Amino acid sequence: MTPTPPTVVVHPDADLLAKATAARAVTRLVDAQAARGTASIVLTGGGMGTAVLAELATAPARDAIDWRRLDIWWGDERFLPAGHPERNETGARAALLDHIPLDPARVHPMPASDGPDGDDVDRAAERYAEELRASAAALGEQGPAPEFDVTLVSVGPDTHIASLFPELPAVYEEDRPVVAVRGAPKPPPTRVTLTLPTIRASHEVWVLGSGGAKADAVRLALGEAGPVQVPAAGARGRSRTLFLLDRPAAARLPAGLAPAGVV
Ligand SMILES: O=C(O)[C@H](O)[C@@H](O)[C@H](O)[C@H](O)COP(=O)(O)O
């Protein structure tokens, strides 16, 4: 399936970007649950990803979501011991997950470096692949991973998304749904990440960008670049791709790109 071109939505500042994205997530997940009974979301780390979760925790319509019928996955994880403050899971739990009535069986953190596979990051990635495969099969889907309702990714200044960094092997991966990453340029070097085919199988992919340091990365991601050099250019959903930006991150959009919702 050829993904539809991205829609760009620009918010006045980072605070409103976080609030509007949280409100958008409520609506999207409620709609998915109304249609199918359950819903799924893939979380991202980073300052903006965590801010969105904190806004979701206090969103007025928060409990319109049936939290017990929501599957929560991660797009990437820093391969550190459980509970480590630098793990994306730790931030997500503090910002949102510890405050809502989730079904623990539907919360799918990526393995930690002191988990059942110890510090074997390849085995940890295989374990997550198995969890993804089992979930897809339970939904009656054929793919190696569920077709997530919403995948959140946050673009880095170097155009990385999840732990898919420019030119590193993970960004070339076409078969496995999740892989280990070594030598990431942003610490820590060892990580686990969903691959582009998994992200692109999502119904909707929302690319978050906040701050002027992201302006060039956003421009490249919306341009003609390929995903090996510009991983964010590969962030596309099957039915919808949104670039959700604040004004500084939208300062250098490609010429001719008319963003919706410029305020
Ligand atoms: O594991 C990581 O290093 C982060 O998750 C990283 O991928 C982050 O999402 C982006 O760099 C954007 O981060 P900000 O939202 O903080 O700018």
Image: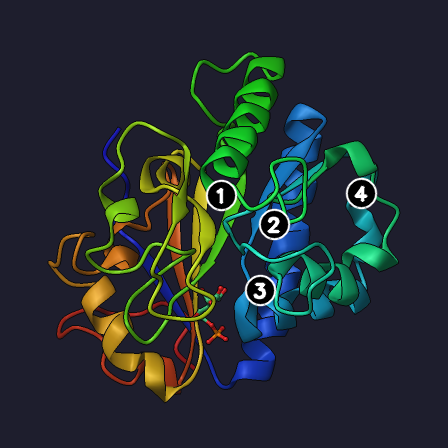
Q: Is residue 238 above or below residue 50?
A: above
Q: Are marks 1 and 3 in contact (CB under 8 Å)?
A: no
Q: Residue at x 61, y 60 (%)?
A: 88
Q: Secondary structure at mark 2?
A: loop
Place of residue 201 in the rendered image (x, y in percent of width and height, measured from the top left): 39, 33
Which residue is tagged 4? 67
Q: Are marks 2 and 1 in contact (CB under 8 Å)?
A: yes
Which residue is tagged 2? 113
Place of residue 25 in the rendered image (x, y in percent of width and height, measured from the top left): 62, 54
Q: Secondary structure at mark 1?
A: helix
Q: Which mark is residue 121?
A: 1
Structural distance between the alpha carbons of marks 4 and 2: 28 Å
* Camera-side mark, 4 or 2: 2
Q: Amino acid at mark 1?
A: Val
Structural distance between the alpha carbons of marks 1 and 4: 30 Å
Say whether disc 1 or disc 3 marks the residue closer to the N-terminus: 3
Q: Nearer the viewer, residue 87 or 210?
A: 87
